[in-house]
Amino acid sequence: LAKTTQPISMDSYEGQEVNITCSHNNIATNDYITWYQQFPSQGPRFIIQGYKTKVTNEVASLFIPADRKSSTLSLPRVSLSDTAVYYCLVGMDSSYKLIFGSGTRLLVRP
Amino acid sequence: EPEVTQTPSHQVTQMGQEVILRCVPISNHLYFYWYRQILGQKVEFLVSFYNNEISEKSEIFDDQFSVERPDGSNFTLKIRSTKLEDSAMYFCASTPIWDRGSYEQYFGPGTRLTVT
């Protein structure tokens, strides 16, 4: 499993775009990049997943450069309710369990 | 939209007592998991379950823990003799079938276990 590094915390204001970058230098050829969101006292929630280039859904965009050694989760026009911890996960072992790191704690201010 | 449910939402128990945490995964899902999160810490994998047997368990999942799928809908985690350090949020998760292209697991709202 690739080791990931992401900022411990980020601050933003309502209406701004937030970009959270995750480094995963030892990503393997078959690894996908997945992001989860967790609100306080709730279970993690899948946000988005990608392999290369750009993926967009109704919640976020995921940008992955050609070398795939990093990825950026982009949240457009955040609101107070986007205050949460965001986890970058890379790869999956044979048992398909999720290995969570410490994540990035995003605080959105009014 | 289907969702994973867990009961109870909060359980308080005394050290040494047995607890059973219950989960109802999404109905057509085949893979089931338990994770836990001690307050302020990371989400940690406990156990995965497929085809009525444990697929993998972490070193946290010692002999005090067991899982069961007693019927077609429930998935339970039993802690035989609780310790103070078992106090945590316990999350159940499920996923339909493993597609190498999808790492999406569906998590329940969690059970907060407090051991006194």
Image (cartoon, coloured by chain):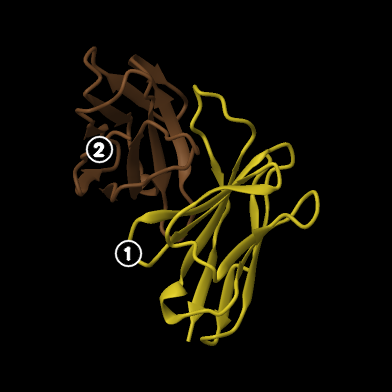
Chain colours: A brown, B yellow
Quadrant into which the N terminus of chain A falls: top left
B91 vs A20, nearest the viewer: B91
Q: Mark 2: few, some, or many residues within 10 Å (few <14, many ≥20)? A: many
Badge 2 amino acid:
Thr
**Compared to A94, does A54 lie above or below?**
above
**Compared to B85, does A57 lie above or below?**
above
Left or right, B70 with respect to A100, comes to right
The secondary structure type at the circle numbered 1 is loop
Left or right, B79 with respect to B116, comes to right
Q: Residue at x 37, y 67 (%)?
A: B39
A64 vs B83, nearest the viewer: B83
- Quadrant hosting residue A24: top left
Q: Which mark is residue A29?
A: none
Q: Which mark is residue A4?
A: 2
Chain on which label 2 sits: A
Left or right, A104 with respect to B102, comes to left
Q: Which residue, given by chain and number where applicable, does mark 1 sit on?
A: B40
Chain on which label 1 sits: B
The secondary structure type at the circle numbered 2 is loop
